Amino acid sequence: MQQRHLIFIASLFTVISTTEINYFEAVANIPNVPDPVTIYDTLIILWANVTDCPPPSCKCFVQVNVTTYNDTYTVTFSSITPNIGSATVSDLEPDTLYSFSLTCIGTDGNATRLLRTDYGRPSVPRNITVTLVSKRLRISWLPPAVPNGPIHNYKLTKDRETISDEIPNNESSYDMTKDYVYGETDTFFFSACNINRKNETVCSNPNDAISATKINYFGNQMYEHFLLPPLMIFDVTMTLWTNVTDCLSSPCECSVRANMTGFNYTDCAVFSSDTTSIGSALIKDLESDTVYSLTLSCVGTDETVTRRIRTVYGRPSPPRNSTVTLVSKRFGISWLSPSVPNGPIHNYKLANGSKIISG
Ligand SMILES: *[C@@H]1O[C@H](CO)[C@@H](O)[C@H](O)[C@H]1NC(C)=O
Ligand SMILES: *[C@@H]1O[C@H](CO)[C@@H](O)[C@H](O)[C@H]1NC(C)=O
Ligand SMILES: *[C@@H]1O[C@H](CO)[C@@H](O)[C@H](O)[C@H]1NC(C)=O
Ligand SMILES: *[C@@H]1O[C@H](CO)[C@@H](O)[C@H](O)[C@H]1NC(C)=O
Ligand SMILES: *[C@@H]1O[C@H](CO)[C@@H](O)[C@H](O)[C@H]1NC(C)=O
Ligand SMILES: *[C@@H]1O[C@H](CO)[C@@H](O)[C@H](O)[C@H]1NC(C)=O
Ligand SMILES: *[C@@H]1O[C@H](CO)[C@@H](O)[C@H](O)[C@H]1NC(C)=O
Ligand SMILES: *[C@@H]1O[C@H](CO)[C@@H](O)[C@H](O)[C@H]1NC(C)=O
Ligand SMILES: *[C@@H]1O[C@H](CO)[C@@H](O)[C@H](O)[C@H]1NC(C)=O
Ligand SMILES: *[C@@H]1O[C@H](CO)[C@@H](O)[C@H](O)[C@H]1NC(C)=O
Ligand SMILES: *[C@@H]1O[C@H](CO)[C@@H](O)[C@H](O)[C@H]1NC(C)=O
Ligand SMILES: *[C@@H]1O[C@H](CO)[C@@H](O)[C@H](O)[C@H]1NC(C)=O
């Protein structure tokens, strides 16, 4: 009888000293909370119900399996409901699986939960380019480097106006539905969006300093400015000037192609660093008095500007078959016209040394 009583005492002692973890979730089991799930993109709040803690109060800790740091998070117990506590774990990565373990003083066991953080804000779409394709702007891009979730859609706005917020996630270009007005400057914002598990839309931040999503697109002022004065058209060279604004690269990258048999002039447009919109191209080795077709193309638009220009008359080759004969005491000079006149021969000139006999 004595022995049985002792066993009873021992087992009662064990029961009252064992801290019980009743609940450990990222869901607040408090009444009247509209959205009790406390899982966010970089933060998770874990809720615990712990009973039978040794006096004076429960002491619990949450550990996270993040390799870069080793913090333990202390569970804070409320004074009103002393068995209910919470720990806020921050600085997590979006859309990432973590393991959370709750340990309490007074128990050897722990409660472990595997939880994935919510989708977060994507980084901006990469390599955004704008080109003009048969009078309409085309925006092309690559998906964000850090999507922070399965990209749901892309969104394009012009100034404050939404052009489309339902561009599917499998697309990589979008064609405007209206013709581009030449010379108009538009500011576009292009973002990638996720819809998180709370049904909230989170889009890449277009005002992000690193975004490069702010596109100032010019179109083609160069149409009006391809041939600026001074015109520098000579017999075998010409210099073309152009004013191209709002280029996608700085300085602008343009090239001029001349329809010369034999070779193409490319990469010959030079933009100065102080007047970055004004460029010139020197075209050499031309034939005088010849029509050339010269085409300017610039990076950022697939439209081109073409001008037909005739080089000026050049130096004729010498008259052919000049002969001098004595005709009744005077010299008579006869000739044939030059084989390469380089223009309509205007006149001939006869000189004795430096002395002009007839101009
Ligand atoms: C905590 O868990 C215990 C055991 O499951 C339960 O009886 C008690 O009502 C819970 N406390 C709260 C505040 O929910
Ligand atoms: C994390 O803590 C454990 C034990 O507390 C220790 O062995 C380990 O080296 C720590 N890791 C880092 C990255 O500090
Ligand atoms: C945490 O642990 C779980 C399960 O072991 C694992 O799947 C997950 O990748 C880990 N997370 C990190 C950030 O290490
Ligand atoms: C939780 O308990 C298991 C075994 O029950 C143990 O392997 C693990 O290390 C414990 N985790 C923590 C954080 O104490
Ligand atoms: C995207 O842009 C980067 C530099 O801005 C470049 O290195 C890369 O080749 C581009 N990718 C594509 C597919 O055009
Ligand atoms: C994207 O998906 C839709 C429907 O799933 C399909 O109609 C469309 O052709 C796809 N676009 C591309 C570029 O693959
Ligand atoms: C998500 O939000 C959209 C509109 O904001 C709504 O039409 C849809 O029913 C919502 N879905 C859920 C699961 O709440
Ligand atoms: C280039 O063209 C733009 C747009 O028409 C104009 O505002 C600017 O003054 C021009 N630059 C020069 C140096 O002519
Ligand atoms: C000049 O370039 C154009 C377009 O790139 C090409 O069609 C043409 O064959 C080239 N001509 C020569 C002579 O290389
Ligand atoms: C260049 O093209 C123009 C227009 O097509 C043509 O009239 C001219 O003869 C061409 N010039 C040369 C050198 O091919
Ligand atoms: C011009 O001179 C060349 C040789 O110098 C000769 O072959 C040719 O017949 C001459 N032409 C005339 C019309 O005399
Ligand atoms: C040419 O000049 C020389 C010396 O300057 C002179 O002697 C000669 O008479 C001149 N001939 C003619 C045809 O004018």
Image (spheres, rainbow, N blue to C red):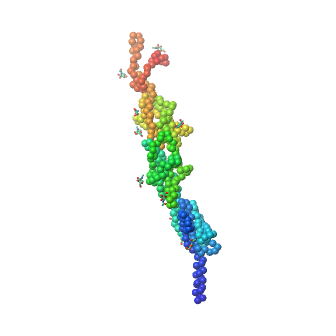
Of 348 and 197, the residue lying toward us: 197
> Residue 237 at x, y = what percent?
47, 31
Q: Is residue 165 above or below residue 136?
A: below
Of 328 and 39, the residue lying toward us: 39
The residue under the point 46% across, 42% down is: 180
Q: Residue furthest top?
A: 328
The residue under the point 42% across, 24% down is: 344
Q: Residue furthest front?
A: 32
> Residue 32 at x, y = what percent?
56, 66
Q: Is residue 258 above or below residue 205?
A: above
Q: Is residue 318 above or below residue 158?
A: above
Place residue 286 in its image quadrant.
top left
Place residue 102 in its image quadrant.
bottom right
> Residue 342 at x, y = what percent?
42, 26
Q: Residue furthest bottom?
A: 1
Q: Is residue 318 above or below residue 217?
A: above
The quarter of the rendered structure image containing the N terminus is: bottom right
Q: Is residue 132 visible?
A: no
Q: For the image shown, how many numbered marks are present on the structure? A: 0
Of 300 and 12, the residue lying toward us: 12
The residue under the point 39% across, 19% down is: 335
Q: Is residue 201 visible?
A: yes
> Residue 127 at x, y = what percent?
49, 49
Q: Is 338 placed left or right of 2 in the picture?
A: left
Q: Quadrant of ligand 1?
A: bottom right
